Image: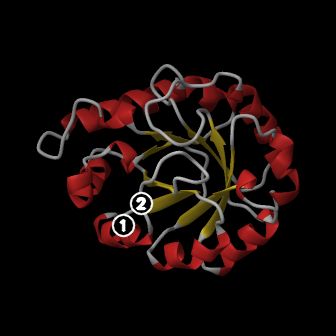
Amino acid sequence: MSFDRSIKIAPSILSADFANFGAECRAIEAQGADWVHVDVMDGHFVPNITFGPATCAAIRPHIKGVMDVHLMIAPVDPYIEAFAKAGADIITAHVEAGHHIHRTMQAIRGAGAKAGVALNPATPAAAVEYLLDMVDLVCVMTVNPGFGGQKFIHSQVDKVRQLRAMIGDRPIHIEIDGGVDPTTAPLVASAGADVLVAGSAVFRGGSVSDPAPYGANIRAIRDAARA
C-alpha cells in the first residue's frame, strides 16, 4: 500500500448481500471502490454479531485492492494473527476495547498488517496522541458502533480537525465510519479525512446483477467530498 491523501471510498460489506459476498466485492471494486471495508462485531463490545477471520479469508481472493478490517471486538489481541493470516491489509482496533492499546498496535504491525486505531464518538482525539508514531490510520466513528444505517453525529467533525492538526505530516489516514453520504462527505473531507466508509449509501439501489447504482453512489460521495 502506498500512502496518499486523495479521497478514498471504502464500501462496508455490512450493507452487501450476505449470500453473494465474493460477487459483491468484485462489483464494488469494478464500480470504483478504493478499499473494501469489513466490519467485524462480536455481540460483546458492540450489540451485533457479523463476521470472523473465515469470512475474510473467503472474500480475500475476490478483492484486488485493500481489505480494511475494522475489529469492533473485545478482547482484540488474541484474534489479530488470524485476521492478518486471512489477508487483512489494515487491521483497526478500538482504543476503548482494552487497557493496552499500544501493545495491540505493536501486535498488528508485528503480524504484517497496517495498524489502525478507532475512536468511539465520546472518546476524545487526545486518546490517540501517544499512538501517532505507530499507527497508519485513525478511524473516527461518526455513529455509535454496532449497526449500519445510523445518522451522522455532527460533533465528530471537530474531532477530525483536531486529529488532522495532531497528525501533522505523518503518513496517517483519517477514516470516517458512519453516516457517510454526499451530504456529510464534504464536512469530514474539509476537516481532514481522506478515507470514507459508506455502507447503505453505496449499496442502495444496486445489486450484483445491476451494479451500476454502486458506481453512481460512489461517484456522488467522492465528488461531494472533493467539492
User: Residue 171 sits in which quadrant?
Assistant: bottom right
- Which residue shows up at 47% across the image and 24% down it? 224
Instruction: Look at label 1 and name its amino acid.
Output: Thr
Neighbor class of circle 1 (other Cα within 10 Å; few <14, some 14-19, many 20+) is some
* Left or right of 198, for residue 162: right
Q: Position of residue 24 (x, y in %)?
A: 25, 52
Q: Identify the coloring.
A: secondary structure
Left or right: 203, with 130 as reference point:
left
Residue 93 on image: x %, y %: 65, 59
Please say whether residue 1 is visible from this viewpoint. no
Q: Is residue 178 left or right of residue 56?
A: right
Mark 2 neighbour density, 10 Å: few (under 14) some (14–19) many (20 or more): some
Q: Is 59 placed above or below 154 here?
A: below
Residue placed most toward the observer, 25 or 53: 53
Residue annotated with mark 1: 55
Q: Are marks 1 and 2 in contact (CB under 8 Å)?
A: yes
Residue 126, compared with residue 161, is above or below; it is below
Q: Residue at x 61, y 52 (%)?
A: 45
Q: Position of residue 63 (x, y in %)?
A: 34, 63
Where residue 132 appears, as percent x and y from the top left, is: 81, 57
179 sits left or right of 45 in the view: left
Give the amino acid at mark 2: Phe
For image coordinates 38% across by 27% down, the residue present is 220
- The residue at which mark 2 appears reads as 51
Kindly tell me whether residue 169 is visible in this rendering: yes
Answer with the quarter of the image where residue 64 lies. bottom left
